[in-house]
């Protein structure tokens, strides 16, 4: 694995031409995605500034151009009309000021008039590498012009450690105020959310206090990317508690999850209704962000980084890493969130694969970019993807009727990675297994169970020999090859 020097990681991108050769090589990779947002070169991590504005969806991602390494971060901009096809627009926020000299870190967007206001963390480091995190503002006009505010909105709060970041901008009708939520770390190293408020988006931001979340005072040592969404008459606190072990998730200490509850914006108390749930039961999902202005009160749209901090992936060697998940529709059902693929995804279907002759237990060819729908009858089920011609190996999805558990196991793939984080994920299904929808891109699998009851999102890097599937159990299966929805064009 390449060792990066600080100079290499924090090198400033001066001319897009510096990336031409690298992008040309990367675009030949067998693992380049066909319908997921992915970096033109280098590393992609969190989605940022997800919003509907000027007749399109805007989405940005954390981008480090030079390779699969966390270094100097830019905001890279992509747009879409339908959340399915995406166009690269290039860099939007550059870390070119003293206050963001070591990165334009994560944040969110608010549309006003003909502009998007982008709230982000300026990751400043001084010569002795001491970090100060500033909450900064940039305005993106509809004609593409980006104007940074000369000074940050505010600096770090003395009551917390250097870890204060990821502004989520919100407006609440009930108080008539704007709020910025920041992920933070208390001085005794517990994860917190701190809140700033103002009546004006641009000025007068004051520290309003710390969010009280009874029962979660000692739950991870830093909370990254917090937000509070209002979905189906409930408040949902979504965040990434760090350095916390969760049963069934291997040695992984980075999780993205949520708590349903009720938010009191006057008192800044979030009263949980139940426990912390992970958002995604798969291996690779983090830093999810909900679009800021979805009008439907019962639904939200969420997208996440299909990757994890402190992890490496087989494409690191090819100088790129990470992609975004498919956007998903979120709804509240009972005391949980359910996540469904967007209805418009059906437009991506290209050809239906004829499975009339497929007999349960056969090994058959699996298209590399496809959707599978399985309608399951009672009983155990095995869906093995990416098996070899003799049916061995691959990614195993299995349901055990006796325990009512669905299991995803990637330990038999040829390319194994992040093994310390566990290679098996299990989820108990209250109502048994009725339905699976699986989206396979060239290096990812997203499994939606029972219409959104659970989702397993994972990167996979199949070799040439891993090109088949096999089903055991009683199920009716349909399969479609899918069209390309992202163009691998280098726009910087
Ligand atoms: C989460 C995160 C954020 C930070 C960003 C930097 O993955 O660590 O807290 O703003 O990534 O890229």
Image (cartoon, rainbow, N blue to C red):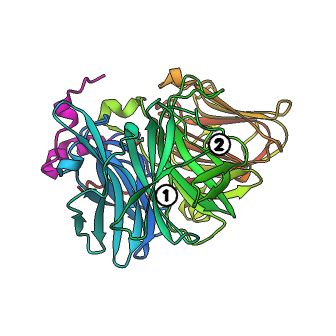
Identify the secondary structure beneath mark 2.
loop
* In-image side of 440 versus 85 (left or right): right
Identify the secondary structure beneath mark 1.
loop
Image x and y of residue 340, in percent: 64, 55
Q: Is residue 338 magenta?
A: no
Residues in magenta? 1-28
The residue under the point 27% across, 24% down is 2
Q: Is residue 2 magenta?
A: yes
Ligand 1 picture quarter: top left
Q: Residues within 10 Å of mark 2 (few under 14, many from 20)?
A: few
- Figure check: 454 above or below 207: above
Labelled disc at residue 390:
none
Which of the 4 image quadrants contains residue 366? top right
Image x and y of residue 228, in percent: 56, 55
- Give how far apart the Cα atoms at labels 1 and 2 are: 47 Å
Work out whether residue 286 or residue 396 is closer to the camera in this orientation and state it.
286
The residue under label 2 is: 214
């Amino acid at each position: 694995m390449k060792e990066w020097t600080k100079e290499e990681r924090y090198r400033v991108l001066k001319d897009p031409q510096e990336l031409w050769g690298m992008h040309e090589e990367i675009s030949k990779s067998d693992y380049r995605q066909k319908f997921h947002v992915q970096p033109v070169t280098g590393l992609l991590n969190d989605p940022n500034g997800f919003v509907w504005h000027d007749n399109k969806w805007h989405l940005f991602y954390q981008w480090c151009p030079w390779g699969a390494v966390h270094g100097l971060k830019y905001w890279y901009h992509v747009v879409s009309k339908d959340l399915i096809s995406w166009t690269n627009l290039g860099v939007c926020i550059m870390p070119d000021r003293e206050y963001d000299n070591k990165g334009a870190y994560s944040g969110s967007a608010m549309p006003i008039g003909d502009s998007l206001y982008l709230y982000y963390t300026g990751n400043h480091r001084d010569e002795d590498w001491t970090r100060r995190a500033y909450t900064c503002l940039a305005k993106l006009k509809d004609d593409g012009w980006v104007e940074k505010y000369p000074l940050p909105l505010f600096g770090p709060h003395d009551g917390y450690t250097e870890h204060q970041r990821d502004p989520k901008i919100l407006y609440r009708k009930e108080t008539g105020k704007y709020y910025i939520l920041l992920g933070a770390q208390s001085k005794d190293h517990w994860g917190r959310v701190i809140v700033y408020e103002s009546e004006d988006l641009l000025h007068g931001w004051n520290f309003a206090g710390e969010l009280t979340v009874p029962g979660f005072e000692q739950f991870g040592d830093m909370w990254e990317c917090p937000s509070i969404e209002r979905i189906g008459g409930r408040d949902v606190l979504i965040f990434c508690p760090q350095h916390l072990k969760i049963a069934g998730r291997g040695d992984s200490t980075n999780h993205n999850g949520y708590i349903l509850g009720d938010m009191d914006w006057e008192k800044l108390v979030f009263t949980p209704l139940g426990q912390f749930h992970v958002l995604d039961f798969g291996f690779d999902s983090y830093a999810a962000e909900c679009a800021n202005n979805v009008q439907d009160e019962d639904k939200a749209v969420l997208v996440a980084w299909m990757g994890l901090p402190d992890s490496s992936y087989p494409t690191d060697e090819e100088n790129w890493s990470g992609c975004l998940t498919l956007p998903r529709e979120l709804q509240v059902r009972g005391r949980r969130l359910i996540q469904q693929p967007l209805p418009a995804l059906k437009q991506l279907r290209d050809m239906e694969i004829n499975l009339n002759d497929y007999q349960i237990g056969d090994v058959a060819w699996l298209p590399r970019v496809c959707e599978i729908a399985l309608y399951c009858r009672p009983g155990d089920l095995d869906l093995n993807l990416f098996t070899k011609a003799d049916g061995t190996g691959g990614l195993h999805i299995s349901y055990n009727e006796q325990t009512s558990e669905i299991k995803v196991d990637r330990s038999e793939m040829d390319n194994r990675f992040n093994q310390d984080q566990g290679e098996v994920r299990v989820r108990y299904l209250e109502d048994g297994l009725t339905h699976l929808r699986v989206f396979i891109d060239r290096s990812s699998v997203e499994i939606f169970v029972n219409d959104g009851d659970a989702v397993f999102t994972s990167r996979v890097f199949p070799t040439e020999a891993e090109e088949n599937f096999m089903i055991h159990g009683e199920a009716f299966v349909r399969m479609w090859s899918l069209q390309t929805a992202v163009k691998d064009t280098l726009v910087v």
